[in-house]
Amino acid sequence: MKNNNGYSCWLQYDLLGQAAREAAVEWAQDIVLTEAAEQGPLKTAVDELTAGMAAMLGKRPAIVPAPVTGRRYILLGTVGGSAHVARLIGGGETSAFGEESYRIKTVCEPDREAIVLAGGSGKGLLYAVFHFLRLIVTGADLGSLDVTEQPKYGLRMINHWDNMDGSIERGYAGRSFLYADGRVLSGSPRIRDYARLMASIGINGIAINNVNVHRQETMLLTEQLLPDVAAIADAFREYGIRLFLSANYASPVELGETATADPLDAEVAAWWQRAAERVYRHIPDFGGFVVKADSENRPGPFTYGRDHADGANMLAAALKPYGGLVLWRCFVYNCQQDWRDRTTDRARAAYDHFKPLDGRFMDNVVLQIKNGPMDFQVREPVSPLFGAMERTNQIMEFQITQEYTGHQIDVCYLVPQWKQVLEFDTLVKGEGSKVKDIAAGRVHPYSHCGITAVTNVGDDDNWTGHHLAQANLFGYGRLIWNPELSAEQIAAEWVRLTFGDNSEVASAVTDILMESWPAYEKYTSPLGVGWMVRPHLHYGVDVDGYEYSKWGTYHFADRDGVGVDRTVATGTGYAGQYVGANAERYERTSSCPDELLLFFHHVPYTYRLQSGKTVIQHIYDTHFEGVEQVEQWIVRWRSLEGKLDAERFRHIGERLARQLDNAKEWRDVVNTYFYRKSGIPDQGKRVIFV
Amino acid sequence: MKNNNGYSCWLQYDLLGQAAREAAVEWAQDIVLTEAAEQGPLKTAVDELTAGMAAMLGKRPAIVPAPVTGRRYILLGTVGGSAHVARLIGGGETSAFGEESYRIKTVCEPDREAIVLAGGSGKGLLYAVFHFLRLIVTGADLGSLDVTEQPKYGLRMINHWDNMDGSIERGYAGRSFLYADGRVLSGSPRIRDYARLMASIGINGIAINNVNVHRQETMLLTEQLLPDVAAIADAFREYGIRLFLSANYASPVELGETATADPLDAEVAAWWQRAAERVYRHIPDFGGFVVKADSENRPGPFTYGRDHADGANMLAAALKPYGGLVLWRCFVYNCQQDWRDRTTDRARAAYDHFKPLDGRFMDNVVLQIKNGPMDFQVREPVSPLFGAMERTNQIMEFQITQEYTGHQIDVCYLVPQWKQVLEFDTLVKGEGSKVKDIAAGRVHPYSHCGITAVTNVGDDDNWTGHHLAQANLFGYGRLIWNPELSAEQIAAEWVRLTFGDNSEVASAVTDILMESWPAYEKYTSPLGVGWMVRPHLHYGVDVDGYEYSKWGTYHFADRDGVGVDRTVATGTGYAGQYVGANAERYERTSSCPDELLLFFHHVPYTYRLQSGKTVIQHIYDTHFEGVEQVEQWIVRWRSLEGKLDAERFRHIGERLARQLDNAKEWRDVVNTYFYRKSGIPDQGKRVIFV
């Protein structure tokens, strides 16, 4: 097997098996195209299909204006732009097509068969092409295709935390491929490859710089750097992706052009209007601003005695004439908390700050809300703010980069976590008010909404550091296209596209992925308590690392018990931010789900979980089990030698070994820590260091 | 009062009071000099005396070859070089003078009075001059002087941990004044000022670069940088100071000139011989090398299967023809320890590594041994290696820079700590085998020995960051000149020289200094256990910060007790490295001094100390007391407003406020940590956060 550095990710068209190639090759003669396709996604769709089939099948199809009698063909077109498409697909079901929707259908006419790829626009067609290529690779029966797709979410975004010095905040896959040494790498061919990857999984918006916007990145809004930004936007546009920028709330002050950033100051508003005009002159389809304000020492409206509606609306007014959005992050909390203060609860902060502002935001403001109330821990409850504001657009923020989930050294397939979040029923409008539907604007009539996530890519050859971390990037795109897909379906699809059709490899990788989030949770922090990580680094164990810090992140373990009392009755009241039965469920230990028990309650080590185990025994058991899981993966991985390319076999094996070291350290430190505190021995009499 | 930025330290000749000036001014007419004083310390002595008296008295004395009848005069000379000196002082008592000894004596001849400053050499005379100037400032009766001094230690050294990029490892007073941006600042006038300061307290050897020698610093041994080093040595030489360099053990490999650094390899030995020849060509009085080998990931002889005698002797052989020394550090331990391994004890390491090598080192090797077995904690026992090697030269290493003792943010006057170390009776040759005498070569017949310390200076205006940290630098020099001085005497002298003669200021500052080390110990880690600091930074509290680390630094606190069992009976056996009654005293809890109890023993929180308190109550009490002490200093400091210059009043007040914040954080975290673990309430019912 040829060594594979992973650069092509899931677009590895040389993996096609013999049978699939034979079945597909007879379709690789004519592509019928009746529309002009000179630029934009429509042209990209044609190019991708032609190149993809050529790469897979060794035969480049011809682009022809009409079918040849008796010969199979592929018909490519948009529902509004091609009468031929309309005739073969039928008007009725496509009339309601959004521009991102598409249909793929095999049509048997008397004299010949055709596969029709029909998009609601060039963009829809591009998605159809990537889908069709996937179908070929995965050996679908091309003689009976019938697929209709439309994305569930309007905004399907990626956030980069790349800085212009080339570093990536919380990046674990090398340096930035967007910037180096204070420059924008606008000429890099990698950016186009990246846009292609993102389009292939349906991403339609990318914010290209870190939400912590420092001096150099503030310059992205100026004439000096906008031509470079526009060059990236051009590459994105070909793949149907709008470019967003993270904006420094104090930009005009940072650039020395106003004395204040007060949102109610006319000069400030005028500055942002000029900035918007400037940006749209360079990038007519610019998406808008992502803003982290008044958070972790970033500037914001609080500095001027204004609230977040004042702040966001001022920016929104500047962007509105051009159709731009303000994605306003709700990650606002007191990061100078005194650990002695037991009344302040960081988990409450986003809800307490934003909920009272419902209805005050302009229509082109979207509140960007992290999936949990804290910060991307391995386990958190769903943020109670999501769906709590009926009259305010919201977008859900996930984290693909494995900040708290193993740094792309440890395997941690996050799609199951995201699915749990999406399936959570908030009850905000009664039963059936699931996160997945709120984010789609189906619970409240949001005009702009969807899902965003912090990406995990860098300039490593394989984009994501760990080869298996590609599954998170792929899975994110697939899931937010269609949240009804199961985590396992997505994993299996990714494995097939990435590793080919060896069933032993496929089942091993799929199993490892599916077991990986539970395993990571087991050997790290127990029962939803979180934060037992090395401060700042966020990899590796330090049980008390955040315990006496200013970050609002405590577990309160003492000799008797552990956990944070967030009940209404005796704690911080956070549980009361949920609605109805959810609030009740979290309020009582008896009904609180085991996996979140220590997030909501401080309980004795001897407290018996719904699982029947005591808390302390659960801690010991899961920590031993987590390590055993990794050991089993290593055995299984070794059995794959020779069944995949040597490079990825070696690379993944080496990361698994590092993961095992990490897991053992977590196990032993956590078990020893709690044994020293509780004095309660392990019922299994396994080794716990004293 | 004129603002004082502290640059002159204890050489502030403008502080003289009216009475002292009047008493001294009549001596400021003639300085009689009968010897040639064209260069070197003798010339410096003349210049310093002239300039010092001019600055203090407003009148520059004349240098004359003979006294004028009827006029008082000061006679300056060396015992071997001036018949006039010999006549006035008398030959008997000065015939045994070492070159660093001196005498200061008022002589009443029938026709006139003279003050004789007589040195064993120009260097001794220079020390006499600084001493005489101190006597003037402190208002001594110049009519009846009679002082004879000789330093107790041959090597009175300073180690810099400065790097060529301008950073200082564990430096808390700004950047380096020796290097910047990879260059040696050999032209900087500050270097001469520094040599003057050091000579004024008797320092006679300075190693100018960090013991962690990286690539750029390895170049200090090459023709490229030796001219710069020589320029510094020239400045030092005028003040009687020999320059030393820290050497990278793998220098020839680092420079790409040999393939190995094996000490038994002939090519390696030849390389070092050439290096020594080169260095001495530039610096004829070069002192030698300080070497940190096989320690904290530095290269060393272990890499080649050789021991430290092999390694040190190879370097010593290269330096021997020129009279150079090898100061070989004994800070060698396993810094990749597994915290799970309870049998390895870092405290044992230096003794275990070096003791078996006694007698194998060349005569110009000196083992450099940190005062304690761990690493400059606020409290440690004395290293059992010191004095344990009868046939191997040793030098004691202290740390002036406040790495673990408050970063020159907190006041911590360390002279009392050093005195305790020096007064420790090792019993290695029976009672009376004190560290202070071992370091002087009076217990074993060491040919080279003395005291060294890591300095606390940087390019801050006042050299040491905190003005009060100057007391440590001054105190170090004074103490190792004469270890019989009390810590309080030294403090009082320093305060008088630095702050002038306001008695309220003097007594406040002296009190704060004398109370400061006990206070720092109280609010930080209790009973000798150490290491409850923020990892790497070493400032601020993190009780478990080093508990599960690779550094061999644990306290083993659990719900029942705390401390490290280092007994022979049940622990690591470290206590057995001491001799006789010392070993017995440390071995038993009943005889172990309270302040070291947790260093040697793991005891229950309810264990009753010799003080009568339980361990847990001692922890609570000392942590409250430590904070109260700082609060009292602040009150007292505020009362000094207007009694010293505004700049130092403000600066020290601001540091005290920061110290109070630090002390409170230590108090609350330590108390909460142990309350959570032990569950035992404070008898005083004071606030302990749960």
Image (tube, coloured by chain):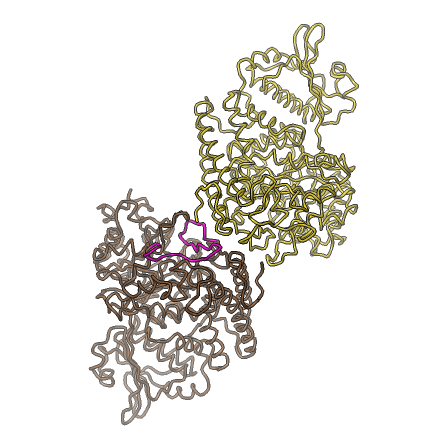
Chain colours: A brown, B yellow
Magenta part of the protein: which range?
Answer: A545-572
Q: Report x, y in % for residue A689.
A: 58, 60
The magenta stretch spans residue A329: no
Asked if residue B356 lies left or right of residue A241, the reply is: right
State which quadrant residue A98 falls in. Answer: bottom left
The answer to whether B596 appears left or right of B439 in the picture is left
Image point 23% across, 76% down: which residue? A97
For the stretch drawn in magenta, what is the main secondary structure?
loop
> Is B251 in front, or is A52?
B251
Q: Residue at x 25, y 75 (%)?
A: A120
Q: Is residue A82 left or right of residue B135?
A: left
Q: Nearer the viewer, residue B661 or B449?
A: B661
Q: Residue furthest bottom?
A: A110
Residue A181 spot, x, y in % from top left: 44, 54
Q: Is residue A469 visible?
A: no
* Residue drawn at x 51%, y 51% as measured from the top left: B678
State whether residue B305 is above or below residue A636: above
Q: Is residue A118 above or below residue A386?
A: below
Across and down, in percent, residue A550 comes to 41, 49
B648 horizontally vs A72: left or right: right
B59 over B491 or under it: above or below: above
Mark count? 0
The quadrant where residue A498 appears = bottom left
Q: Which residue is rendered at x = 55% and y = 21% of the image?
A: B13
Q: Is residue B6 above or below residue A580?
A: above
User: In this view of the protein, which residue sits in the foreground, A134 or B689?
Assistant: B689
Q: B476 or B128: nearer the eye?
A: B476
Residue A557 included in the magenta stretch of the image: yes
Which quarter shows the N terminus of chain B?
top left
Q: Position of residue B450 (x, y in %)?
A: 70, 36
Q: Quadrant of residue B447?
A: top right
Does residue B640 show up? Answer: yes
